């Protein structure tokens, strides 16, 4: 193997939190534990090509999105390289070409930071393994995946939950052995079969740039009047969710997941300065979901991330009826009637 030159390539998915991470300290460490479903169809493919150069004082890389140079991504990658260089000391000895593409439209309002940062972190750890072993094509060990999750966290907090699946915990929780603030770990208990192939339909309410970034939102938790209560609430919601995920009690699952979504947005409403990321159609959709549940006894529920889009979660056996409901009612509240049907997945794969 030529260690002067090579390439590695990974596909990594997005994830959707059930208990939300909102508020951090130190080097992207979470103030509370979060747990997420790993997604499947929404993912990023990243190819990292590297070539040895005379050690330089700066990082050398170019980023391409869908085959075209994307200069707007480069400050984010530079910041990431600066943060991770102590853990990957070879970075300045190489020049990089980072070619990336997302399975979902770039302007869909779906954050590509979780899938993108986890894919890049996996490529870098894979490259390190190649350099150390002198061999390519090797899959990563558990310890190496953990290192990639650790590095992904430094790129974007929630990215550390995208490498594996189907349910990933990030942040120390007393009832979850092995949980850490530094990286994501698999939910360590047997998950009830009712949650297998769980669906997540992402209803694309607003595709524009967010008015307030999640970085700013996390920072506003520092002087937030309800911050401590919120962090306690998240810990306690995860304690309640553990038995539910084991015993398949979906009505109780719904209560926690919907409350978490609204609590996240309540933090935004009560920050100083305050802000609102939901749009009128976000609330229309939520109300329609509640009506649909009342009328049909469906087990579909919603969650939100830091934006206006609604994630509709439902069990596999409701796939057809819920899809009908989406097409007939909810799609009207989406930009260009667009939505993305996804389902729970098992994490990143080497290409
Ligand atoms: O990973 P960040 O810094 O973009 O924060 C994401 C936070 C939420 O998506 C709102 C919640 C979560 O846990 O994913």
Image: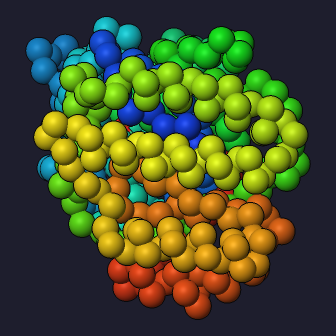
* Most foreground residue, 154 or 32: 32
* Residue 1 seen by the camera: no
Q: Position of residue 123 (x, y in %)?
A: 46, 33
Q: How is the image coloured?
A: rainbow
* Most foreground residue, 342 or 34: 34
Quadrant for residue 102, please give it.
Answer: bottom left
For residue 214, above or below residue 87: below
Left or right: 296 as drawn, with respect to 103: right
* Most foreground residue, 144 or 37: 37
Q: Position of residue 33 (x, y in %)?
A: 53, 24
**Which residue is most to the bottom?**
328
Q: Image point 34% across, 28% down: which residue?
A: 226
For residue 348, above or below residue 145: below
Q: Image point 41% across, 69% down: which residue?
A: 283
Q: Position of residue 196 (x, y in %)?
A: 80, 51
Left or right: 32 as drawn, with respect to 55: right
Q: Position of residue 117 (x, y in %)?
A: 39, 37
Q: Point out the quarter of the image occupied by ligand 1.
A: top left
């Amino acid at each position: 193997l030529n260690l002067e030159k090579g390439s590695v390539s990974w596909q990594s998915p997005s994830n959707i939190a059930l208990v939300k991470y909102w508020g951090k300290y130190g080097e992207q460490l979470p103030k509370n534990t979060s747990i997420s479903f790993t997604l499947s169809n929404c993912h990023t493919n990243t190819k990292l090509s590297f070539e040895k150069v005379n050690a330089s004082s700066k990082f050398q890389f170019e980023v391409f999105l869908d085959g075209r140079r994307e200069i707007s991504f480069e400050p984010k990658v530079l910041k990431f390289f600066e943060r991770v260089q102590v853990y990957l000391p070879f970075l300045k000895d190489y020049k990089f070409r980072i070619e990336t593409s997302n399975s979902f439209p770039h302007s869909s309002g779906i954050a590509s930071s979780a899938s993108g940062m986890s894919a890049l972190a996996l490529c870098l750890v894979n490259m390190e393994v190649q350099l150390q072993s002198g061999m390519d094509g090797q899959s990563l060990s558990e310890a190496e995946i953990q290192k990639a999750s650790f590095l992904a966290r430094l790129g974007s907090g929630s990215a550390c939950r995208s490498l594996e699946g189907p349910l990933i915990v990030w942040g120390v929780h007393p009832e979850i052995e092995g949980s850490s603030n530094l990286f994501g770990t698999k939910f360590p208990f047997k998950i009830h079969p009712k949650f297998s192939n769980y669906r997540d339909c992402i209803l694309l309410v607003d595709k524009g740039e967010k008015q307030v970034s999640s970085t700013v939102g996390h920072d506003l938790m520092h002087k937030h009047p309800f911050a401590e209560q919120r962090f306690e609430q998240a810990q306690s919601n995860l304690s309640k969710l553990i038995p539910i995920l084991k015993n398949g009690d979906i009505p109780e699952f719904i209560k926690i997941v919907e409350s978490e979504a609204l609590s996240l947005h309540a933090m935004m409403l009560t920050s100083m300065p305050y802000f609102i990321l939901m749009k009128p159609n976000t609330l229309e959709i939520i109300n329609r979901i509640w009506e649909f549940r009342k009328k049909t006894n469906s087990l579909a529920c919603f969650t939100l991330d830091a934006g206006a889009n609604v994630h509709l979660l439902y069990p596999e056996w409701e796939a057809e009826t819920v899809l009908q409901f989406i097409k007939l009612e909810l799609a009207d509240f989406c930009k260009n009637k667009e939505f993305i049907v996804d389902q729970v997945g098992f994490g990143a794969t080497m290409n």
